[in-house]
Image (spheres, rainbow, N blue to C red):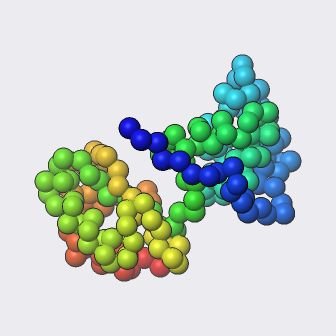
Amino acid sequence: MAWITKNSAGAHIERQSEPYLNDEMKQELTPVVDRYPRRQAASLPLLHAMQEKVGWLPPQAIEEIADFLEVPASEVMDTASFYEEFWLKPKGKYVIWLCQSISCEIMGEPSLTDRVAEFLDIQVGETTPDGKFTLMKVECLGYCGDAPCGLINEDIQQKITPDNFIEVLKNLD
């Protein structure tokens, strides 16, 4: 397997003047950190808390979490980039998850995905330029009897056809 490398050492991190991990948030998170035998072990709850607050994990926020935990930023980034539920770039107002399980695939998921990607003019894993939609695939949502299925944020969509799903997307504000 080949590793994909990039020159992250020279990467520019955009910064906002106010910290993401402000004093109030540190005060709230200190009892969480104190429950663990090592500060690094609190990485997951802190990443979840930050993503809940900001909507994604900006590089500055990852550095601030690392400083708070007294660990290298690379270790926090390793954790954040390992788990799929963490967003390392902004996501859309509506995150569309299309199930790609075998049931959904048999019932037309590939053509559904192609049609939605074409309608939004993005590929899976991308966000529309206006920040409204992010298109993702997920392995299984557990609604195999109503395949193909998907989610729009937390709302399940069942027995999707390209036409009815595009109509749902058109009606979102």
In the displayed structure, 27 sits above or below 108; it is: above
Pick the quarter of the image with the N terminus: top left
In the displayed structure, 40 sits above or below 134; it is: above
- Residue farthest top in this picture: 37
Task: Give the residue at x 57% y 51%.
Answer: 6
- Residue farthest left in this picture: 106
Expressed as whole percent of the image width and height from the top left, the position of residue 119 reads 32, 78
Expressed as whole percent of the image width and height from the top left, the position of residue 123 reads 37, 67
Give the side of residue 43 with respect to residue 171, left or right: right
**Is residue 45 at least partly visible in the picture?**
no
In terms of depth relative to the viewer, which is nearer, 106 or 155? Answer: 106
Specify the quadrant of the image occupied by residue 26.
Answer: top right
Task: Give the residue at x 72% y 22%.
Answer: 38
Give the side of residue 1 with respect to residue 19, left or right: left
Task: Give the residue at x 14% y 57%.
Answer: 107
Specify the quadrant of the image occupied by residue 167.
Answer: bottom left
What is the total number of numbered labels drawn onto the structure image? 0
Give the side of residue 52 with respect to residue 71, left or right: left
Give the side of residue 156 with respect to residue 11, left or right: left
Expressed as whole percent of the image width and height from the top left, the position of residue 27 reads 83, 41
Specify the quadrant of the image occupied by residue 115.
Answer: bottom left
Task: Give the residue at x 47% y 68%.
Answer: 127
**Is residue 39 at least partly visible in the picture?**
yes
Expressed as whole percent of the image width and height from the top left, the position of residue 77 reads 63, 42
In terms of depth relative to the viewer, which is nearer, 43 or 154? Answer: 43
